[in-house]
Amino acid sequence: MNFASTLAPWSQPQFLLAICLVTTMSGVIVPAMRFAKTVYYLTRSDFKTVMLPILVFSQSVVAWHSTTRFLATALWLYMVLIEFCLSNQSSGDSPVEDAHNKPYRPIPSGLMSVETARRLRYIIPFVNAVLSHYLGGRLAVLASVTLTVIDTLHNDIGLARQWWGKSLLAASCYPMGELGTIAVARAGSTVNLHQLIAVAVSAIVNITTIHAQDTPDVIGDAEAGRKTLPILYPTISRASIPLVLLASTLGVMQISDAHPAFVWLMVIFCFITSLRYILVRRPEKEMPSFVLYAVWLSLLHCSLSSLKDDILSNGLTMRTDLLQF
C-alpha cells in the first residue's frame, strides 16, 4: 500500500466537506461560547438578588400562567438586568472594586473592555424599549425607560456613591422591575389592584432592607470610595437588619391570604437570616447571610400572591375616593 492510496479516502469530496464544516462550526461555536460566558459572568451575582425575587413575585401575583409568557417575562427582566450591569460595572471605580470583590466579572477578567461595555450600555436601552413594546405594551416601556433613568442616576451621575442615593435608587429598581414583569406576564393587560398593592408593599420592604445587600461588599465599596450604610454606621445598620426583617414579615402576615406553607417558611427564614446577621460579622463570611436574605425575600413575594379581602376592599374604596376627588 503506497502513500497515495492511504490518503485516497480523505481526498473524496464528502471528507473535504466535513472538514470545512468542522472548521466553520468551530469558528462559530467558540465565539458563541465566549459570548455566553461573558453574559453569564456579567449577571451572575444578580440571579439571586434580582432574577429570582422579581420572577417569583411576578408569577405569584399573576392569576394565569403559560410557558410562553414566563419565558417572555424572564427575557424582559434579563435584558434590563444586562443594561444595568453594563452601566454599573463600567462606570467610575467599579472595575477596581470588582477586581477585589468579584474578579470573575467580564471587565476585571478580560472578557470585555470598559470601552465595549460603555458602547453597549448606550445601545441596549433602545433595544429594551422596542422589546418592551412588543412584549408588554406601554407599561413595560414605561418601566424600561424608568429603569434607564435610574441606571443613569445611579451609575453615570454617581448618586450611588452616597448611601442614601445607593439605597433609594437600588430599591426603586425593584418596583419598576416588578411592574414591567407583571405587564409582560399579562401580555400588556392592565395591572389590577391586588398587583399594585403587592408592588407597593414590596417597594417598602426593599427600601427598608436594601442595606442587607451591601454587607458582602464592604471591603470593595470602601476601596472604591462608596459610602454605604454598613460602612458609615456598621453597628446600627447591622442591628437594624433583624428588626426590619421581622417588621416586614409581621406586616406581610397581617395582609397575606396565601398558602400557610409560604407564610411559615417566610417566618422561619426571617429568624434564620436575622440570627446569622447577628452572629456572623466578618465581611468575607457575609455571602451565606445574603443568600438567606434573598430566599426570605422570595418567600415574602410568594406570600403576597393572595391578599385578604378586607385589604382589597379598603384599597378599592380608597381608589374610588381618589378618583372622585
Image (cartoon, rainbow, N blue to C red):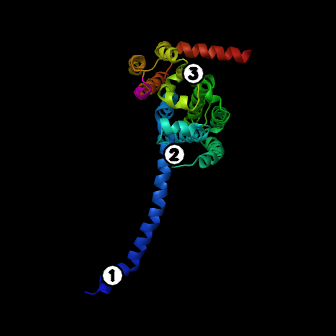
Residue 31: image location, x then y, percent: 49, 57
Q: Give left or right: position of 130 versus 78.
A: right
Mark in front: 3 vs 2: 2
Question: Dot 1: within a 10 Å radius of its alpha carbon, few (fewer than 14), some, or many (20 or more) residues?
Answer: few
Question: Dot 3: within a 10 Å radius of its alpha carbon, few (fewer than 14), some, or many (20 or more) residues?
Answer: some
* SS of the residue under disc 3: helix
Sooner in the amino-acid sequence: mark 1 or mark 2: 1
Question: Does 113 appear above or below 256?
Answer: below
Sooner in the amino-acid sequence: mark 3 or mark 1: 1
* SS of the residue under disc 2: helix
Task: Name the residue type under label 2.
Answer: Pro
Do we see residue 211 in this rendering?
yes
Residue position marked by numbered label 3 in the rendering: 207
Q: Any mark on residue 214, and which?
A: none
- Quarter of the figure that contains the C terminus: top right
Farthest front residue? 223
Mark in front: 1 vs 2: 2
Residue position marked by numbered label 2 in the rendering: 106
Question: Dot 2: within a 10 Å radius of its alpha carbon, few (fewer than 14), some, or many (20 or more) residues?
Answer: many
Residue 218: image location, x then y, percent: 50, 27
Identify which residue, 124 or 322, lies in the foreground: 124
Q: CA distance from mark 3 to mark 2?
A: 29 Å
Q: Give left or right: position of 187 versus 269.
A: right
Farthest left residue? 1
Residue 35: image location, x then y, percent: 50, 51
Residue 223: image location, x then y, percent: 54, 31
Q: Give left or right: position of 200 versus 7.
A: right
* SS of the residue under disc 1: helix
Q: CA distance from mark 1 to mark 2?
A: 45 Å
Q: Which residues are magenta?
A: 282-288
